[in-house]
Amino acid sequence: MHDEFILGQVKRCNRNLLLVNAFILIAVFLIMSLSYTYYYNFFFGPFPIDAATLSVLGDMKEQKKQYVTVTGTDVFNTGLQIIETTYDEGTNKVINTKVTTDYLYLVVNDLALVVKAPPDSTGLSYTGELTTIPADLKAELISIVTEEGISFADFDRIVLPYMVDAQHSNAIGYIGLVFCVPLFCLAVWNLLRYGKRASDPLAHPIYKKLEQYGITEEVAGDIDNDIASTGAPVTKKIIISDSWFVKKNMFGLTVIPLENILWTYKHVIKHKAYYVVPVGSSYGLVLHLNNKKRIQIAMSQKNVDTALEIMQQKAPYVLSGYSDVLAYLWNKNFPAFLAEIENLKNAV
């Protein structure tokens, strides 16, 4: 007894659906797990934090609450700013400068907390990401205070080793959600579809598409028999039998009765670098069907030639070879196209 080709393809597509969407689901879980601290703060922050907590903080990597609101009793400038400079492209002269960031000291119970804030900020409460002061920023701050007679040791005693980035943006979090949530929903939906199709193979779209050719089980049986007895493989994905043209897809199967194919030919695209230098060609098999659909399948020149040869052997009634006249009629006048097809067949 021959293998059930159609059922085998249903199982193959189901397996691909399961594997791809399980991979997507695992990837989403991995991304979210690696971003757990970020999204914990994204959803539940900002968290109020006081001087006592700030003074005993350890490694920031172990600090779960990193999106915080801190309130002080006084604020003053560090003397450090970030300035954006615009230059003239022709002369390279400065045409505009703009302060984008002020670094402040926020006084919290006799300790100073560095705050990266918008320009001209004077408030006593700031919300942002709590991070360790970068080494280069700390060095610049120390160089400023040493000019005022404050020692390195005094700086470390007075200034907390952390800073609040009040210019922190949650845009990355929203981008991550926009990316991950739809993927998660899609994967779950597809896994539910997999479960339904695995439990009831006849519910698979492959079987549903066969309904247009007759009773599903009978059509599937005819295809199974025809593929088993007369199927000629063109590639790993394409098989041509005496009655059917079959192409395997990632999640489906294209099945076309040869009698529905009116015209076929080799499509050639010549590629050029800089619109001048020839760099090769790509090829495709084009099928024009009696329902006014055009199908183009990319493959090697050798495989296109093989497919055309097999189709001529198995379905000599299918017109083969490109024609400008037929191409024009196909696009402009389908009834005339059908008439021309018949005329050419009769002439042959």
Image (spheres, rainbow, N blue to C red):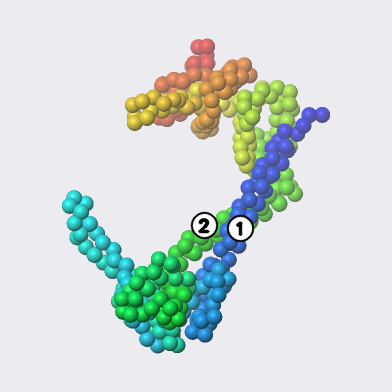
**Which numbered mark, 2 or 1, is in the foreground of this view?**
1
How many residues crowd mark 2 within 10 Å: few (<14), some (14–19), many (20+)?
Answer: few
Distance from label 2 to label 1 (Cα)? 14 Å
Q: Amino acid at mark 2?
A: Phe
Which residue is drawn at the image coordinates 20% and 54% (left, top)? 92
Which residue is more in the foreground, 94 or 282?
94
Q: How many marks?
A: 2
Quarter residue 81 falls in: bottom left
Q: Taking 177 as reference, is 264 above or below it? A: above
Disc marking residue 179: 2
Element carrying mark 1:
helix
Disc marking residue 319: none
Q: Taking 274 as reference, is 143 above or below it? A: below
Which residue is more in the foreground, 343 or 2?
2
Which residue is drawn at the image coordinates 70% and 27% (left, top)? 227
User: Upstream in the sequence, badge 2 or badge 1?
Assistant: 1
Q: Is residue 193 left or right of residue 344?
A: right
- Label 2 close to label 1 by CB (< 8 Å): no
Element carrying mark 2:
helix
Which quadrant would the N terminus be assigned to in this image?
top right
Which residue is more in the foreground, 112 or 249?
112
Q: Amino acid at mark 1?
A: Leu
Which residue is drawn at the image coordinates 67% and 54% (left, top)? 192
Q: Taking 281 as reference, is 34 above or below it? A: below
Q: Which residue is mark 1?
A: 30
Which residue is more in the foreground, 255 or 328?
255
Q: Position of residue 65 (x, y in %)?
A: 54, 74
Quarter residue 79 falls in: bottom left
Q: Position of residue 31 (x, y in %)?
A: 57, 58
